[in-house]
Image (cartoon, grey):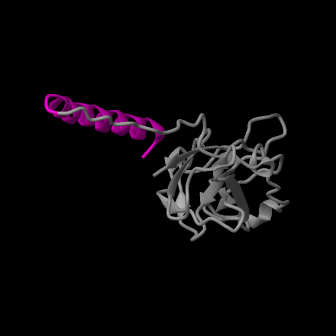
């Protein structure tokens, strides 16, 4: 449930309680006090997880002789502080869904397209996998994963990235790409 849904549910419950309280006022006075807090944000992504460069490594174009050949997978780990202003926001058991967005490869639209420049490699894209090696297409969602908090109240998720050939003729060059992700809590 996102913050907006929780706020709407709280307002609905408050309205319901006021209706019940109105009937009680006819006989006796009933005072209902509501308390709560709204936070500006739900978590902090640690500095090391923001705008992180991921070194994918250096590979020979001969490693990609056939369509679908892949490089070694590189781990992408993001860490979230699950508290904000010293207030615990979530505990273990909360699930998150990560949506990876970026420019899709023109040939294999499940892959992230390499950034275009005069010296860019061609014939490969970047494939995203979850920690169980399940492929996650670019511009799609990972599916909900349960967060487990460590002793510091931090949560982390691990994803993997690798190059995947889209053509038999892979040309050497810079193989850079830009990936964004959004987090949805449940």
Prevalent SS, magenta region: helix
* Visible residue check, residue 36: yes
Q: Is residue 14 magenta?
A: yes
Give the residue drawn at x 68%, y 52%.
81
- The magenta region covers 1-27
Give the residue drawn at x 71%, y 43%.
114
Q: Residue furthest bottom?
A: 132
- Count of marks, rendered view: 0
Q: In the drawing, does residue 37 fall left or right of residue 18?
A: right
* Residue 169, percent from left and from top: 70, 54
Q: Is residue 140 magenta?
A: no
Q: In the drawing, does residue 174 fall left or right of residue 7?
A: right
Give the residue drawn at x 52%, y 38%.
37
Which quadrant of the figure has residue 4?
top left
* Residue 60, percent from left and from top: 83, 62
* Visible residue check, residue 159: no
Observer-nearest residue: 84 or 120?
A: 84
In the rendered view, tell whether residue 120 sits above or below residue 83. above
């Amino acid at each position: 449930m996102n913050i907006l849904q929780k706020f709407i549910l709280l307002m609905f419950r408050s309205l319901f309680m006021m209706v019940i309280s109105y009937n009680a006022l006819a006989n006796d006075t009933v005072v209902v006090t509501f308390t709560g807090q709204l936070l500006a944000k739900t978590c902090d992504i640690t500095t090391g997880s923001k705008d992180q460069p991921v070194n994918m490594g250096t590979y020979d174009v001969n490693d990609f002789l056939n369509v679908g050949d892949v490089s070694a997978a590189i781990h992408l780990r993001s860490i979230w502080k699950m508290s904000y202003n010293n207030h615990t926001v979530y505990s273990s058991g909360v699930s998150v869904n990560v949506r990876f967005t970026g420019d899709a490869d023109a040939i294999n639209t499940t892959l992230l397209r390499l950034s275009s420049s005069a010296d860019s490699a061609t014939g490969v894209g970047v494939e995203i996998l979850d920690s169980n090696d399940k492929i996650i297409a670019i511009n799609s969602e990972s599916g909900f994963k349960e967060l487990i908090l460590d002793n510091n109240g931090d949560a982390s998720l691990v994803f993997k990235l690798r190059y995947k050939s889209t053509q038999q003729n892979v040309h050497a060059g810079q193989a850079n790409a830009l990936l964004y992700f959004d987090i949805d809590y449940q």
